[in-house]
Each structure stands twice: as structure tokens, then as C-alpha cells.
Amino acid sequence: MAGMPPLSGTFRVIDLSAGIPGAYCTKILADAGAEVILVEPPEGNPLRERSATGDPVDRKLGGVLFQFLSCSKSSVVADIRQPADKAFIEGLIRGADAVVWSEGSAACADPELSPEAIRKIAPHVTVLAITPYGFDSPWRGRPANEFILQSMAGSAWNHGLAPDGAPIMLGGNQGDYAIGVAGAMGLLVSRVRTMASGVGETLDLAGLEVLQLTHTMYPTTFLDLAKRPHRAKPADAIPGIHPTKDGRWVGLWVTTGQQWLDFCTLVGRQDWLDDPSLALMDNRALRSDELVALIDEWTIERTADEIVELASLFRLPVAEVTDGERLPQQDHFAERRFYTKNPRTGVTQPDVWYAMSGGAERLASSPSPALGADTDRLRGEALTPLLPVQANPTGVNAELPLTGIRIVDMTQFWAGPIIGHPFALLGADVIHVESAQRPDGIRMAMTRPMTEPGWWESSPYFNGTNTTKRGITLDLSKPAGRDVLLKLIAKSDALIENYSPRVMGQLGLDYDTLSELRPDLVMLRAPAFGVRGPWVDRVAYAPTIDEAGGLAWVTGTPEGRPQMVGAASDAVGGMHGTVALLLALEHRRRTGNGMLLESPQIGGALQISAEQVIEHSAHGVVLNRTGNRSWINAPQGVYRAADRQSVFDEVPPDDWVAVSVETDAQWHALCTVIGAAELAKDPAFSTADGRRRGHDEIDSVLSKWCSTRSAAEAAEALTAAGVPAAAVVPPHEIADLPSVVARGVYETVDHPVVGGMRIIVYPLRSTSGPKRWHRRPAPLLGQDNEAVFRGLLGMSDDEIDQLRTDGVTGTEVLVNRGW
């Protein structure tokens, strides 16, 4: 069984999609051993033509991003207008286990290949349908792309302002990759259902909902608990990203009070140490201009390497802001072999983000297919599904297919807990382990003062990421606590942890020890940079990952400093961990083998920043920040509209509209709507390249038109004409969008301490369910101690009482309030 990837020989996927989300989804599956067949029109998948640098593309082989996303796949060409070709596609579908479908694809535009029609052709097949807003959305068919979805996800208010005051979107199509990994997760869960029943399903994946989960950190939940927006306007993080002596940028981050004190010591600011008001992030933001300038003075006297070394000695989160040229050169990435070579071109590209043992090691990728390379071969084959179906409709809870799996969740903050959250939402028994002495650190981001009882239960972030889990407390520094944990692990299928790499070994909880206790245990380790290598001891939060992984480099304006991305690297890194764990459990099902599984948080970021590395390796070009413009689309931007007053007095009345033109047809429609016939007739603007060169002139006309209308009015006029556009929505309003309300994207959860709050559901709507995602609120501290200790582990009342007496377990935080 050695060298057998988890999905090899057991999963065939037909990819009818167009765009990065579907391509990344099927890349994840192909890398795990699935057979993926691309169905392309005669002119090829549009992604073949993508070139972020503008270099010429061989349409038969495709551009460098296509070649990265399409390794180990096959390609067939079929003209949907020809009856014989349509019959060919239908034959492929009947022989498949899953189909990836998206709006914008030539094949998917045919009503006879709609998700509903595909399910009639092949009831055993699961169809993953990727759309901007969802199949039952009142906005179905409304034009949109990743940039437009960002504008409605609250993302734009997290990373600074352009010189004209416009909020800045994330660069590098980061949302598209988040949609892709969510789709891969959905298909892996669907496999569990189908293997038990032989029946497929439709997975309705709305891009907007993925971005609302991943690009903002529960702003609606915060609003409900704090009764105010988390942030009225963009604010600089202090410290943040600063220039260095050698012309580079370095990112520093402070979360805890102790980290702020250590940072003040690092930069030699006794006056800041003596000012207790600066311990609060919001207070530092009020003095942004002053503090940023002084930190810049300190960093500009030192090289990036010197700053990283000094800050690391203080255990501060720090990283160089790295671009597409420097990413593969980083000593940690090189030593860990996080990059590999494209098997066709030799271009540098990321390898898979996870490392598996137990005989699940990945085989080498094969080159991406030339257009139609497998057409003749597959026309001559009668395909049959590969999925091993053991039809037993009562053997798996169709609504909650992960029922029966037990996971010990030793994670904290957001990147870790989000790994196990979908498992809990889909039926697994996920037991979150913390301690009264050191609870999950995200509890400290609370909305109630420490003077109130149960203040540690008021964190919107803990409550958002831990619903439907059980919670226990154990002081693992005490032998009795460790003994109880070992008993729990012996009764569990998987263990997840994202502590600093040294911690589990210090506790005697290394994989060798635990696998002796439970030989088929899957142990997932998910620290920031992995469990070995030069950066193994570095502290990191999401901004550190953004900076080290290339995401911050492409966010911001060309003339300004790179911008922190926000919390997206936590959420998307966690989702990559979920996929890795699903793959490991599938390997365990097939072989009976447990494994040590590593899914470092940086891995997801390196996948998302792949285009930067690939383009530099192939063409020697460093892709840079473009503000709200695009490497591909033109015009694209955020334009000031007529002001509107918020219901919150502290929120500025600025109103903005996002516009992103992808095609020549959309360009002409835009010109018609805004009355710019002279632009439409100008041959200089007849191509996307020409429009990028003349962007300033176009912006002048478009800005004038937008300024006389509300953002909502401008967006409605443009979308009605087929132009992707939307009002830029502040985070505290994202749950009120018509599509989001109509689809029930937020569920109200009643909490025994803090009351009702809205929490976003997981962005995977299935015809099989679940009907409700958040069936229980996040656990109170130690809420399930007795249920787990007595009911699961068989401990007596006296034993449980002794744990309480000895301080091994507890239900109130026992921590210094300055921690």
C-alpha cells in the first residue's frame, strides 16, 4: 500500500467548470490521487489564456497558472452544440463519481447539462455547483467575480485606504482559492454519503458565502454581542508593516498585552511602556500617524533579517513581507521543500501543503494536459464509476454523514478550531480541550468587561468557531490531566493540535506515544510553519502568515506599503487542514492505518500565492500591488458614490461602488450605461490590455458617473446591463444583503450566558442537509467535563471530584487579567 494517495483508483471527477475555483478544487483532488477529466470547448478552457504578466500564451498548452492548476488531469474537447459531443459528455458523466459545474462555462450554459439534468443522467453522481450567490438566490444570474464578491463580504474594510479614500480589496484572487478548497471539502464529505447509499447529491456552493466566512471574522456575531460595529472605518495595526534599511518590508504583530510590552522593549520605547492606554489596540489606532512614523524610524535603521532575528528572540510574531521572487528562496521553504518543479516546464510552483505518513505518500505529478490530449482515448473507453459503494442507506446518517467519528480538538484561536468545526457541524463528536488556567486564547477577545461574571464566554470569535462541539478542561501540566487526556485519545479517531511544535513533545504527547495507545489514530499537527525547519519556533498569527506567504505583498497600492490581509489566512488555512484530515481519514478507512499528518497554516497561503511564484519563475516578473485594479480585468476599481448615512453615528457616510469588467461585451455595456460612447468607439480601449493602459482616463469618466448616484443605484444599473458591480458593504451590514437573507446564511444561536447571536453557517448547501448547522452553541468553559469523564471514560464521581479539588479541571478562568 506504500505510495498510495488517499483517492487513487476510487474517485473520478468530471470538471465542466471555468475559472480558478473549480480548477483549484479539482487540483486538490487530483493531487490526492483522484482521476480528473477536464471537458473543454474547442477553443479551450478560458483559464488556459490567463497571463497575469501579459506574456504570450500557447493556447494548446495553456498559461503557467493553468499548467499549475491542471497537473495530473486529463483533457477532452467536446463541442456542446454537436449532438455526438453532447452524448460523449453524458457518457463521461455516467462513468464519473462527481461533476464540478460552474457558471461561465460553455458546457454548463446548456440547460441539458444543468445540475438537475446531470443528476437525472446519473443519480449516483454528486454535482458541485459553484455560483456567485447560490442556486436559489434572488440574485442568481447576477454578474459577479471574486472582486465583486469581496465588496459584499466586508473584506475591503480590513486593509487600508487608497489615496482617494477608497477601501482596498485583497489582491491575487485570494477568494477564488477559498471557494475552491471549500468545494473540495464538500466533495470529500459527499463521498461518505454516497459510499453508504449509492446515491449522489447536489452541493450548492455560493462564493459570496465562502468569502463572508473567510474574509471577515464574525462581524455580525460581534455586532449582536457588542451592540456596535467592530470597526467604524479602516485602522492601521500598530505595529504593522514597516520599511527596512535594505529596501524591504517587515511585518510585526501584537495580540496579547505581554506582546505589546515586549514590543515596546524591543524598540526601546519606555514612554510607551509607561502609558497603560496603549495596551489596547483601539487606543493605539487613535494615535496611528504618530506611532507608525516612530516605528518606521526604528525599522528603517535595520535590515529585514536583523528585525526578524531580534523580534523572534522576544517571541513576537514577525515576518519579512515576501514576493514571488523571494518566496522560494526563504530558507524554511527551501529546507521543507514546500516548492517543486512543474513536470512539463520546470517552472517553480508550490507542492501540496500537507505531509502524510502511513503509506499515503503522494506520487509525483504528471504534466498538465495539452488541449484535447485525451479525447480519442476516452471516446474509446466505456467508463464506470470508481467509488466503492457499499449500499446501506441506514449505515450513515445522510444529514450528518460524519456521525460516529470522534475528534480530540486541542486547538486554539481561529486557524486551529476551524479545522474541526465542519466535522462537528456534520455530526462528528468534536471535543474541544482547554484548561481553566490557560483557556483558548480567542476567549480573551471578549465583548464584556472582566468585572462581569462569565466574561470569558462573550467572545464572538470563540462562539462562532466552536458551535456544536463539546468542551472540557484539563490542566495537562499535571499527571492526572494527562492521564485523562490519554484515555480520551484512546477512544478517539483523530487528534488535532496547533500548539507551538515543541509543546506536544514536552507534554509526552508525541505521535509515537499516542499511536502505541491507538494504532489507527490520525494525529493532525497544524502549527503556523510546520513541525520542523528553521522557522519551527516562530510565533505567528494570520497577519504573519499573510506576510510570509506572499499575500500581503499584493494587497495595497503600488506606491504604498503592503497591507495586512486580515484574518483570511486563519480561516483558509484551517479549511486546508479540514481537507487534509478528510483525506487522512479516507486513507485510514481503506487501509486501517493511522498516520501523522502535518498541515501547516502557511501551506494554504503558499497555494494561494502560487501565481506570483510561477510568473516570476517563468518570466522573471514580480507581480506587484495594483490597489483596486487587476492583473487581468480592466477597468476595475472602487469608486466614490453619493454619501449615505449609517445607522451608527461613528460610521463615516462614505459610500463606494465596486466595478470589474472581464470581457469586451461587458466593456461596451458599461460604456452604454454611463453614457461614454466616445470610450466605446476608441480603438485604444478595444482590448483589456488597452483598457489597462488607459485606466486613468476611464476612471475619470466612471468616477464622475458614480459620484452622482448611490452605490446601490449605480450597482443596479450596471448589473442589469450585465456588468459585474456591487456596493461596497461594511462588515456590520453583510448579513443584511438580500441574497444572504433569502438563503438563511446566518442562524440565530441562543447562548446561556450572552443570549442570542447570529452566526454564519458553513457555506456548503446540500440536498441531503443538514437542515440546521448550529444545533448547539459553543460550549461553556468545561461545560461537558462530567458528561465526557463519566459517560465516555467511565470515571466515578469520586474521581471527577478529585480532579476538581486538585485543580485539574474547572469551569471558571483562573488566569491573571493582564494575560
Image: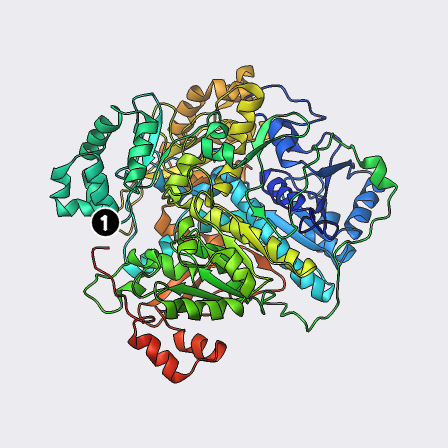
Q: Where, by quadrant of the figure, is residue 125 drawn?
A: bottom right
- Residue at coordinates 79% horizontally, 44% vertically from top-left? 89
Q: Position of residue 750 (x, y in %)?
A: 38, 70
Question: In the depicted view, which residue is nearer to us: 804 or 247?
Answer: 804
Question: In the depicted view, which residue is nearer to us: 390 or 289?
Answer: 390
- Residue at coordinates 60% horizontally, 26% vertically from top-left? 347
Asked if 532 appears above or below 682 in the picture, the reply is below
The answer to whether 462 appears left or right of 102 in the picture is left
Q: Is residue 779 visible?
A: no
Quadrant of the snapshot with the C terminus: bottom left
Q: Where, by quadrant of the figure, is residue 536 drawn?
A: top left
Element under disc 1:
helix
Question: In the depicted view, which residue is nearer to us: 310 or 126?
Answer: 310
State how the image is colored: rainbow
Q: Where, by quadrant of the figure, is residue 225 drawn?
A: bottom left
- The three-letter amino acid code for the residue at tag 1 is Gly
Question: In the depicted view, which residue is nearer to us: 620 or 358?
Answer: 358
Q: Position of residue 666 (x, y in %)?
A: 56, 31
| Mark 1, residue position | 257
Q: Is residue 394 visible?
A: yes
The answer to whether 463 appears left or right of 328 in the picture is left
Crowd class of label 1 (few under 14; some 14 to 19; many from 20; radius 10 Å): some
Most extreme residue toward the right is: 380
Q: Position of residue 353 (x, y in %)?
A: 55, 42
Asked if 301 appears above or below 481 in the picture, the reply is above
